Amino acid sequence: MQITSSLVPFVSVLWMTVFCSAGCKANPVSCRLWAEPQIPILSMDGDFIIGGIFSIHYYVRSEQTTYTMMPALPQCAGSMEFRQLRFARALEFTINQINNRTDLLPGITLGYQIYDSCSDVPISVKVAFQFANGLDPVFNDTDACLNSTAAAVPAVVGHSSSTPSIAMARTLGLFGIPQVSHSATCACLSDKREFPTFFRTVPSDQHQAAALAKMVKYFGWTWIGAVRSDNDYGNYGMATFLQAAQEEGICVEYSVAYVRTQPRSKLERVANVIRRSTARVIVAFLTSSDMKFLVEELVRKPLPPLQLIASESWIIHPDFLRYNICAGALGFGFPRSVIPGLREFLLDLSPAQALKLPILTEFWESSFSCSLKGRTGVRECDGSEDIRALQNPYTDTSQLRITNLVYKATYAIAHAIHGIICNDMHCDKTNEFVSWQILDQLKKVNFTTKNGYQVNFDSNGDPVAAYELINLQFKKDGALDLVPVGYYDSSKPRGQEFSMSSDISWVGGQTEVPVSVCSESCPPGTRKAVQKGRPVCCYDCIPCAEGEISNNTDSLDCVRCPPEFWPNTKQDSCLPKPVEFLSWNDTLAIILTVFSITGAFITVSVGAVFYKHRTSPIVRANNSELSFLLLFSLSLCFLCSLTFIGQPSEWSCMLRHTAFGITFVLCISCVLGKTIVVLIAFRATHPGSNVMKWFGPPQQRLSVLAFTLKQATICVIWLKVSPPFPFKNLKLYKEKIILECHLGSSIGFWAVLGYIGLLAVLCFILAFLARKLPDNFNEAKFITFSMLIFCAVWITFIPAYVSSPGKFTVAVEIFAILASSFGLILCIFAPKCFVIVFRPMKNTKKHLMGKVPSKAL
């Protein structure tokens, strides 16, 4: 159909030119067209004739072409579209109103020629040629036949549909005749290179499609079906909508087309596609006639609840108020208006007046189901018919929408003519002008109609886009009604064009917004994964990976939590990781603290026993000075383990390792001193030996001080170069932070431990060598055993320290300190305390010298 509408004007112009030239050569006086002109349905003479064309009927009676004689004039068929008749009579009313005005075209009478196109493109093109050439088929002047520039009408109002308007615009554009459409919305008509003389008072579908896409997105519908009229209106409108929908992230399950002239099988296929679909929202970009066929087909079989989204062509059509399937339909329509005097004009019709014009006769007979001409088989109209009691789209002026656009289009043409022939409220009807002048004036018009509407055109010949959002709702009596629930105004700032109320009734009268999605929304904590081979709106919800979250619905990606945070169980928010360290209220810490204090208490108690019996032989024989120093260092060893408990800080980290290193070296130095004293003491018993004078009390003190100062020096260097510091270990556990003391310099740490180990091994070797020296109370045996325990503890400590996680690393270190400390005090001092307290009879010099037989302890 589109190809035909594109070729007809060209073929017609070519045919008319050739035939007219031949006719002029045959008869230089006149030429005649073969075809008979199309007769207007409404007409009136005037100084200037305004053309009008409407789709009052939807079909053309087809006849078989024999190619042996001229085909008859095409005749309209089918029932009359009363609403379109109202549009045509609105043009008639507007021209009468203009003729009665003194401020617009004073002294000028406008006439009109109004045609019924029967929704047929060839008829529309033929009428377009008649607008250019007039109704007379005979041309008496050859020059007029070939070279005339004056058109029969200065401008045209119409057509009602996009496809005929396109064909007419291409034809009228050749003659420069402006065409002002009241209802052709195809966005393609805004192209001024192709349609330079086309104007319209109806907004382009470019705006409607964008508004529909925004509305669909607003209600969260991402999975929709699309059905359109298979003509310029539907194809261009749907293409624009689909592009806008794609930009809004909306997916289309299907897009099907239908036009009423196609076979019924095509209509059934379209209806079955809709029935089988999973989309519950259908965007129907159809003409009212195509939509009517589709609705009637859909109601034939059971249908799931469908939310209809309508284009302006059918949402405002009163015919759809009788279909319950349309309840809840939502779409944009042109704003309602009031045209004073129009209703009275439309109702000022009597049977006698109706008989004067075939179109009005048909209207009267169709409305009252009677015959004005006495046709057989039909009831004769008896004069009782009351047009004021008639309820049909012709008499219904409560929803004047497109009618107002006809009103505005007619006034625009009148103002353009006024701008050419009138000057200072004086009009000269003898002024000659051509159509191009009207075209220029139309581009400049800017006025307000009597009913308060602004009329002007942009550079594309389009008005400012304004729509009402219309909802088909049930009234209290159960009938459907058109209810405005929002507004769209393209002249407002970006983002503020759209407004909506909450009083929307959905499909079936529901109050809840229907859901139409291919996949349910992915909750926070998951991300969308598109299903292979399906639209982006069809997806699976994949839980976020470990350590990642998504805090929005339908997240495309999960976000990894910052290093110090970890997802909650729902993985929809990042929570601070719990910080773990060996705190004071930890059960393990409490146990270790008890042992530490117990060890220190035992050490102090031993010291008190030794001090009380400091003059006794067993205390004096075991180097009381080193013993007290050893007890002091052991108490420090027990207490230094407490520095490992609690939240690590800069000072506690430095203190715990250095205190541990120095106190243990002091302890081992004392034990080493006692071991050396034992060895030297037995060697001093040999005749002539004076070794003991080289390791008397001063030398013992210096040796302990020297050993301890070396460890202190190592610690000072360690603290100076790279000291321990508080460190948040984020790698050991993913879900929590281990707050620990970083060693700083590992060399410093292992140097401290190594030095302690070196002294312990040396002490063990010397004590082992002195274990069999003759004595009843050889302290070397106990030192050997204590050093054996000490070395075993710290050798075991190294792998346990390295492999223990988190706070257990600190616990292992404390355990090693306490175990080795308990080993020293139990092995070295427990036997002595036992003798002092429980076996005082053995605490004698004779017994210690072996002069009293005794079972070795």
Image (cartoon, rainbow, N blue to C red):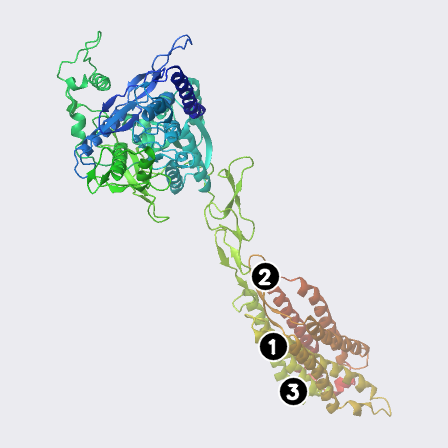
The disc label shown at residue 434, or none:
none
> Where in the figure is residue 196, as x and y percent of width and height?
39, 35
> Where in the figure is residue 291, as x and y percent of width and height?
36, 26
Quarter of the image where one finds residue 16: top left
Closer to the observer: label 1 or label 3? 1
Tell me how far mark 2 sits from mark 1, CA to CA: 24 Å
| Type of amino acid under label 1 | Leu
Residue at x-position 35% and y-position 49%: 493
Quarter of the image where one finds residue 179: top left
Q: Are marks 2 and 1 in contact (CB under 8 Å)?
A: no
Residue located farthest toward the right when viewing the structure as drawn: 687
Q: Tell me if 752 is positioned left or right of 645 in this view.
A: right
Binning the other alpha carbons within 10 Å of mark 1 as few (below 14), some (14 to 19) or many (20 upward) gives some
Tell me how far mark 2 sits from mark 3, CA to CA: 55 Å
Q: Tell me if 469 is positioned left or right of 638 in this view.
A: left
The disc label shown at residue 730, or none:
2
Work out whether 324 lies above or below 592: above
Residue, disc 3: 613
Q: Nearer the viewer, residue 513 or 791?
A: 513
Secondary element under disc 1, as helix, strand or loop, is helix
Residue, disc 1: 655
Work out whether 679 lies above or below 306: below
> Where in the figure is residue 479, as x and y percent of width and height?
24, 28
Closer to the observer: label 2 or label 3? 2
Nearest to N terminus: mark 2 or mark 3: 3
| Type of amino acid under label 2 | Leu
Binning the other alpha carbons within 10 Å of mark 2 as few (below 14), some (14 to 19) or many (20 upward) gives some
Tell me how far mark 1 sits from mark 3, CA to CA: 35 Å
Q: Nearer the viewer, residue 460 or 203?
A: 460
Q: Tell me if 632 is positioned left or right of 340 in this view.
A: right
> Where in the figure is residue 550, as x and y percent of width and height?
49, 50
